[in-house]
Image: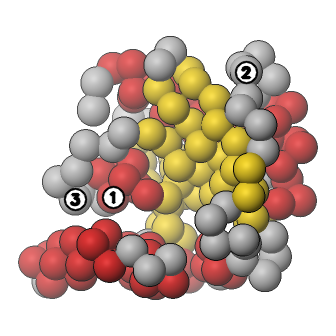
């Protein structure tokens, strides 16, 4: 993870932490922060759809993509860049699978990244989400990592 990526991640985390918005990091950045051997390509943030406008306001200095529906129909996403680092904001509706996972405190792990606290989905929850999305390749990597960790 290069310095540009680290700085973008810390900026996103500090901004969201100070805002009071419920959020979690997910995807490859979450995998990396929990010790998996991956190179994150973007920062995936999951929020509740009700916080979407607030998050857009928090990052209003950046140019966002148009909102698009998530492929599973359970929310919307918008993207923006911090110094060439892509940030994807996924806003799940309350019936969404990620929403249900992030709404249960037992599914969240507090990660420390260079002194900044980042809430992440536990890998077991990520595994369920990837299975739900039909992404067996990612699910298999999580299963393998969890097995090797035991």
Q: Looking at the picture, does residue 71 appear above or below residue 129?
A: above
Give the percent coordinates (x, y) of residue 92: 74, 65
Image quadrant where one finds the N terminus = top left
Query: Which residue is painted at 33% across and 58% down in the image?
Result: 31
Left or right: residue 70 compared with residue 110: right
User: For numbered disc 2, what is the local secondary structure?
Assistant: loop
| Residue 82 coordinates in the image, percent (x, y) | 56, 21
Return the residue found at the far left. 148
Q: Residues within 10 Å of mark 1 (few under 14, many from 20)?
A: many
- Residue 10 appearing in the image: no
| Residue to which mark 1 is pinned | 31
The residue pinned by badge 2 equals: 63
Q: Residue at x 17, y 54 (%)?
A: 37
Label 3, on which residue?
A: 36
Sequence order check: which comes first, mark 1 or mark 2? 1
Left/right placement of residue 38 relative to residue 59 reads left
For the C terminus, the quadrant is: bottom left
Identity of the residue drawn at 70% across and 42% down: 78
Q: CA distance from mark 3 to mark 1?
A: 5 Å
Is the residue under label 3 in contact with that under label 2 (CB below 8 Å)? no
The residue tagged with tag 3: helix, strand or loop?
Answer: loop
Of residues 128 and 133, the one nearer the viewer is 133
Helix, strand or loop for disc 1: helix
Q: Is residue 77 above or below residue 125?
A: above
Q: Who comes first in sequence, dot 3 or dot 1?
A: 1
Residues at discs 3 and 1 in contact (Cβ within 8 Å): yes
């Amino acid at each position: 993870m290069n310095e540009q990526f680290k700085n973008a991640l810390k900026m996103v985390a500090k901004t969201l932490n100070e805002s009071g918005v419920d959020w979690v990091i997910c995807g490859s950045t979450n995998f990396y922060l929990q010790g998996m051997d991956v190179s994150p390509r973007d920062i995936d943030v999951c929020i509740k759809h009700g916080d979407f406008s607030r998050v857009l306001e928090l990052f209003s200095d950046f140019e966002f993509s148009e909102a698009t529906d998530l492929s599973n129909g359970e929310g919307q996403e918008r993207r923006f860049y911090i110094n060439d680092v892509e940030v994807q904001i996924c806003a799940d509706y309350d019936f969404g699978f990620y929403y249900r996972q992030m709404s249960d405190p037992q599914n969240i792990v507090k990660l420390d990244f260079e002194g900044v606290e980042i809430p992440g989905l536990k890998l077991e929850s990520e595994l369920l989400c990837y299975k739900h999305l039909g992404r067996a390749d990612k699910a298999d990597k999580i299963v393998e990592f969890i097995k090797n960790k035991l």
